[in-house]
Image (cartoon, rainbow, N blue to C red):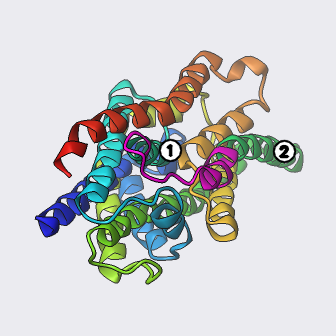
């Protein structure tokens, strides 16, 4: 029975990883597609490849998620907690995907795990959630917005006397590189979160030792699942990010992607913090948009996105908590 539960939870984790891929595909490629730097098919193929590469470049975020968020008990009870957390995250991903809202799969996962654990009195590491989730959740969009705004001001000043045609063509080409960098950052951040949950399930089931690192097959399967999800596309959210917030040009698309990917790399390697790729790129897009007139950013759409951000943690926690309560008697 324990092995069956472990297999089930690992399978559900890979389903979450897949939904993460198609839900967050827009993070990496919406700007490049909207500015016609890449065709949708080429952008999705490139994003899928670089998501795999990014997933193989480190385990710092995976270790934070796998051991720093909750400490479920061993056996069936712990496995059901992890299962419930994943179910809550998947539910929120599907709801926001249907609405076309770019919300955070990362925060849905963390909210789901915390909600599933707290209702059955399983330990939740609130200090880690504060330091590694809540504070970065607030700071990363602010940093992304501010840096993108300043970088765009610098680009506008640097090319103020250049002819628009060559500049636009140059940045359209450069966007291929920045979109690839964003895809790499998405794999580095988001695939690692699934690796951490899969390892957490293996530890709870007694099939892996705490502190023994991330098994290679876990790394490879998580990388493959998020890549397949990315390749399937997330057109609803892509439209919101690519054109719903602001009409992007190649220069602004390049700056937004470059700034956002830099924030992703820094937080992954320097702080092992599981930040939201969605929050970061959306804030960067708003930042480059703010260098136009104030009305260039569609603040109504931005407000809808902000509402989804605020609701993600509690909504996923609520769904996961209810399911955890229902399943707890079976442990």
Instruction: Note whether 20 is above or below 205 in the view shown.
Output: above
Q: Residue at x 70, y 46 (%)?
A: 135
Residue linked to disc 1: 107
Image spot of residue 126 (x, y percent): 59, 49
> Toward the viewer: 205 or 66?
205
Q: Are marks 2 and 1 in contact (CB under 8 Å)?
A: no
Q: Please, what secondary structure does the residue beneath circle 1 have?
A: helix
Image-quadrant location for residue 76:
bottom left
Q: Quadrant of the N terminus?
A: bottom left
> Magenta span covers which residues?
118-136
Instruction: Note whether 176 is above or below 278 in the view shown.
Output: below
Left or right of 243, for residue 251: right
> Toward the viewer: 162 or 145?
145
The answer to whether residue 268 shows anywhere in this view is yes
Q: Residue at x 77, y 28 (%)?
A: 292
Question: Across the whole image, how many numbered discs are drawn on residues?
Answer: 2
Left or right of 269, for residue 236: left
Left or right of 202, for residue 146: right
Instruction: Label the magenta part by its dominant secondary structure.
Output: helix
Residue linked to disc 2: 150
Q: Please, what secondary structure does the residue beneath circle 2 have?
A: helix
Q: Does the magenta-highlighted stretch encompass residue 126?
A: yes
Image spot of residue 290 (x, y percent): 76, 30
Q: Nearer the viewer, mark 2 or mark 1?
A: 1
Image spot of residue 282 (x, y percent): 60, 38
Left or right of 4, for residue 159: right
- Within-10-Å neighbours for mark 1: few <14, some 14–19, many 20+: many
Question: Which numbered tag is attached to residue 260?
Answer: none
Image spot of residue 201 (x, y percent): 31, 65
Q: Residue at x 54, y 43 (%)?
A: 278
The answer to whether residue 180 shows anywhere in this view is no
Cα–Cα span, label 2 and label 1: 27 Å
């Amino acid at each position: 029975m324990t092995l069956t539960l472990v297999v089930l939870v690992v399978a559900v984790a890979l389903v979450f990883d897949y939904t993460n891929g198609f839900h967050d595909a827009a993070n990496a490629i919406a700007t490049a597609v909207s500015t016609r730097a890449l065709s949708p098919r080429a952008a999705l193929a490139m994003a899928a490849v670089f998501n795999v590469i990014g997933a193989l470049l480190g385990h710092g975020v995976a270790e934070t998620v796998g051991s720093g968020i909750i400490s479920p008990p061993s056996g069936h009870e712990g496995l059901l907690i992890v299962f419930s957390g994943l179910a809550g995250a998947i539910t929120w991903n599907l709801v926001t995907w249907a609405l076309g809202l770019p919300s955070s799969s990362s925060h849905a996962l963390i909210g789901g795990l915390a909600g599933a654990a707290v209702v059955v009195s399983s330990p939740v590491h609130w200090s880690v959630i504060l330091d590694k989730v809540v504070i970065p959740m607030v700071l990363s969009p602010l940093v992304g917005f501010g840096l993108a705004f300043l970088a765009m001001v610098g680009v506008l000043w640097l090319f103020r006397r250049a002819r628009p045609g060559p500049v636009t063509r140059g940045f359209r080409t450069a966007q291929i590189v920045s979109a690839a960098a964003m895809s790499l950052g998405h794999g580095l951040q988001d695939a690692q979160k699934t690796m951490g949950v899969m390892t957490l399930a293996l530890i709870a089931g007694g099939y892996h030792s705490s502190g023994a690192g991330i098994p290679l097959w876990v790394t490879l399967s998580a990388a493959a699942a998020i890549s397949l999800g990315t390749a399937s596309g997330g057109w609803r959210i892509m439209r919101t990010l690519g054109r719903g917030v602001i009409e992007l040009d190649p220069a602004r698309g390049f700056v937004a992607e470059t700034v956002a990917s830099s924030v992703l790399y820094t937080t992954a390697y320097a702080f092992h913090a599981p930040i939201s790729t969605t929050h970061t790129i959306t804030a960067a897009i708003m930042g480059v948009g703010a260098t136009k007139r104030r009305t260039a950013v569609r603040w109504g759409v931005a407000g809808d996105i902000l509402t989804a951000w605020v609701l993600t943690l509690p909504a996923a926690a609520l769904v996961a908590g209810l399911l955890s309560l229902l399943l707890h008697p079976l442990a």
